[in-house]
Amino acid sequence: MENRDAFLANIARQLGREVRTTPEAPPEPVNDYATTRLTELDARQRCDAFIAFASGAMLVSCEMTSENEVADAALRLCEEYGGAPVVVSGDERLKTLGVTQRLTDALHADIWDPAVGEQNIQRAEQAKVGVVYAEYGLTESGGVVLFSAPERGRSISLLPESSVFILRKSTILPRVAQLAETLHQRAIQGERMPSCINLISGPSSTADIELIKVVGVHGPVNAAYLIIDDC
């Protein structure tokens, strides 16, 4: 930039001080909550706090289950939220848990398939329930983390009336700081990160009008966390 020194000198003179060539040292932080809050909790305590916040502030229905019972629990939740039509993520982990097959047999659920393109979105728009697998839970916000992929479309948790999120107790982290650290380590180990990472905290809601909270404004009306007790 031309005349930069003269420009900065003029600003300093107008402010009544000398020209500063080095930035001031940042102030000492008042606390270290950004990296330490909730880290003192063990896995059980994190899960309890996660459920308390999600079910209280975020209006999410939370349920503990086991690997052997998760498929039946997912079916029961889908039926409670209206049953068919149901759309299920093509995530291999849902297939391994038996969720995909159970919902296909009982409710003729549609499986997200990148080969059929826009047809997936049309199915999600018409579905009563969308079922997805969450990578992580976040204790502080009561939210879940979703990784997008060709077989795990974002529409599954956005367009149906209700969303069911299946996650493992062992993947519930204290807060976003630990999520960032975990993703960084996964990237260092050579894992390719997804193009989109979604952080979802309960059913869609807004309090823009008169500070009155309205649920189900621009997304699912209902949200449920099905937590696999694996630790």
Image (cartoon, helix red, strand yellow):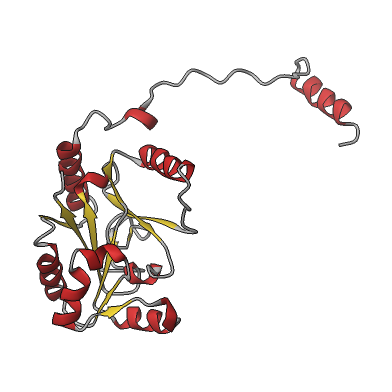
Front-lying residue, 85 or 193: 193
Can you say whether 151 is above or below 138 in the image?
Answer: below
Can you say whether 46 is above or below 64 in the image?
Answer: above
Q: Position of residue 217 (x, y in %)?
A: 33, 68
**Quadrant location of the N terminus in the rendered image:** top right
Q: Residue at x 40, y 79 (%)?
A: 121
- Tell me where residue 128 sits by quadrant: bottom left
Residue 118 horizontal side relative to residue 77, left or right: right
Residue 131: tell me if it is visible: yes
Count of residue discs: 0
Q: Position of residue 166 (x, y in %)?
A: 22, 59
Q: Residue at x 28, y 31 (%)?
A: 39
- Tell me where residue 7 sits by quadrant: top right
Residue 222: tell me if it is visible: no
Front-lying residue, 210 or 136: 136
**Quadrant location of the C terminus in the rendered image:** top left
Residue 93 horizontal side relative to residue 229, left or right: right
Q: Position of residue 45 (x, y in %)?
A: 16, 37
Residue reaching furthest to the top: 18
Front-lying residue, 34 or 123: 123
Residue 102 horizontal side relative to residue 128, left or right: left
Can you say whether 192 is above or below 122 in the image?
Answer: above
Q: Residue at x 42, y 76 (%)?
A: 114
